Every structure is written in structure tokens, then in C-alpha cells.
Image (tube, rainbow, N blue to C red):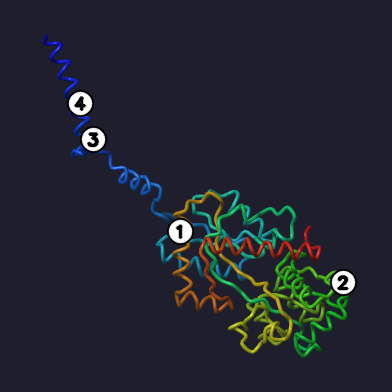
Amino acid sequence: MKAYGKWIGGIISCLAAVAVTACGADVAQPDVGSETQAIAGQAAPVYPDRQIEYVVPYSAGGGVDLVARAAADYLSKEWGQPVVVVNKPGGGGTVGAQYALKQAKNDGYTALAVNVSNTSMLSAGMKQPLITNEDQVYAARIGKGTLAFAVKADAPWKDFAEFSQWVKQHPEQLTWTSVGPAGFSAFGVAEWMDAIGADFTKTRMIVTKGASDSLPKVAGGHAILAVHTVGEINPMLQAKKVRILAVSGSERSPFLPDVPTAEEQGVKGLTVFWWTGVSFPKGTPDYVINKWEEAVAKMVNDPAFVKKLHGIQVEPDYADSAQFTQDVAKETGYYVELAEKRNMRK
């Protein structure tokens, strides 16, 4: 009987427990929300907590390098951790990009100073590029530079409209400089040729090592045209060795307010522009990307930083990760179409 009683009592206790729970009694339950928050908290550690390597895939002194150094200086102070610029030039920007995107860890401590030449233009100029948009996460765009068309200071053309008409009639006489068939200058020239209806294939490209090499060639009469950013041309412009006939875009450059746009002179549709920003390898944690987005957004509104950009004729041009990614994808599609149309893809 005692065993029977204990058995009955056990059943009654179990039924009571079920009833109490069902009726909503104050029974301690696991705090799922707290656990989720704890896991989320663990997934977002303090960043950065040590030195960041900011890879510039070009030589020191160029536009990408100077913007990166200004950004590194600002971010080092903002975060209280050193952001160190490391130059890894070669391969038109692909050597440094491969290092930062394919060899380094995707932990947020190796960033790439990315720009138009080794992204959308590289993808458009090569059928099998070494670096693609899919290899990286675009964190934030920092600044942009206006494309300008420069000729020798005493060149015979009074303006860009007259020069364009001459080129349309005599394309075989036009020589222009570029680091290669898929360089920034090449896309600028190809777009211009397309806009005026000139035969791009009859013009002649003179390969150079960049603005520091090409502009002296134009000034010395060894090439007719150099297409670079306003900042790259400015030293030779100030020395009165070259003359800028026009800038691209819908508005005049704030650094050259007296130089009319190509559109003002009847040449419409020139959209090529230079930009630079920061990207990371695929798989980089979201908290890293978010941190850079927030910091760059604040940085481009900092008067001291903007002053540094203006000193090298670069305009602040912020875009967050989503917008930056969308812009590069759209730009890549446009450049691929242009390259295929002008038989520039290799």
C-alpha cells in the first residue's frame, strides 16, 4: 500500500506541475533574448585593438597614396590604434590588391586603398582579371578626382570644341599617353572618342609610367594629349608647361573654376572620374565594415581632413558600403560595354 500511495502521489505531483506551467505560473524560464545578446556581444569584439595595415597598391606620392595617408593619420587618432600605410606597387595595382585581398587574413587588420583603376577598369580591360569585385567587400568611398584633358601650353587649338573637331577629322594624328590599354587615361580617351564620333582605332597610344612621365612628354611635344586628374596635372599647369582644355562631368572643378567642362563646349556624356576608398577581403566581419563606414562618414566632414584633400585637388565623396558596392557594379558594366565596343578588352 505504501508503494501504491507513493506511485499515486508521484502522478498527482506531475499533473500539478503541468497544470501550473500551463496556467502561466511564475516558473523560471531561460532568457532567450539575453542569450542572443550575449552571443551577439561575443561576435563583435573591440575593434581595432591593434595596428591596422593599410595597403596602397601604388608607389608613394600618387593620389591614392596621399589620400590613404591623410585617412590613416585621421583614423589613428580617432581609434587610438596605429593605421600604417604600406606601399606595394606593381601590376597596375594588382600586386598590392592580391596581397590585401587574397593573402592577408580577413580579420579587418589589412585594408586595401582601392580605386577605379584596379577595380571596374581592370575588370573591363581584362577578360580574366586577377582581381574582381567579387574578391572584396567595399567598405566606404572617400574621395574623387575630376578628369581633365591637357595639351602643350602653346598648342594651336583655342578650346576643347575646336580640338575635338580636329581629332574627328584627323584621328591618325592624335597621340595620347596612358599606362596601358586599360588604364584610366585609356577609358577617358575612349569615352571622348565615342562622344564625338571619332575613330579610336586610328589614334596612337604612347605607353608611360603615369602622370609624372606622360605630362613632360606632352609639354615636350612628344605626345599631343594627356588625360589625368586635375590634381595630377596641376604642377605642370602651374609651371605653365601644359594647358587644360576641358574637364569632364556636369560641373566645373572647384579647383579650376575658370576651365569649362566638355559639356559646356558641346561634347556631352563624359562621365569617367577617378575615385578612391577602402575595401577588405570577402568574409571580413560586418562589425569591421560598419566601423569603417562610420569613421569615414565622420572623417569626410572633418575640416582638417577636407583641407588635406583639397591640398591635392581631391574632393570628399563619401559612400557607405551598400552604395559604394552598387556604384562600382554599375560602373563596371558601363566600362565593360565601352571596352568591348572599342576592342580594348584583352
Which residue was labeled with disc 2?
A: 202
Which residue was labeled with disc 4?
A: 15
Residue 213 horizontal side relative to residue 331, left or right = right
Q: CA distance from mark 3 to mark 4?
A: 11 Å
Secondary element under disc 4, as helix, strand or loop, is helix
Q: CA distance from mark 4 to mark 2?
A: 93 Å
Which residue was labeled with disc 3?
A: 22
Q: CA distance from mark 1 to mark 3?
A: 44 Å
Secondary element under disc 2, as helix, strand or loop, is helix
Q: Is residue 275 above or below residue 101?
A: below
Q: CA distance from mark 3 to mark 2?
A: 85 Å
Nearer mark to the viewer, of 3 and 2: 3
Q: Residue at x 68, y 81 (%)?
A: 247
Q: Amino acid at mark 3?
A: Ala
**Residues at circles 4 and 2 in contact by the CB criterion of under 8 Å:** no
Q: Position of residue 62 (x, y in %)?
A: 62, 70
* Chain-order first, disc 3 or disc 2: 3
Secondary element under disc 1, as helix, strand or loop, is helix
Q: Residue at x 31, y 42 (%)?
A: 32
* Chain-order first, disc 1 or disc 3: 3
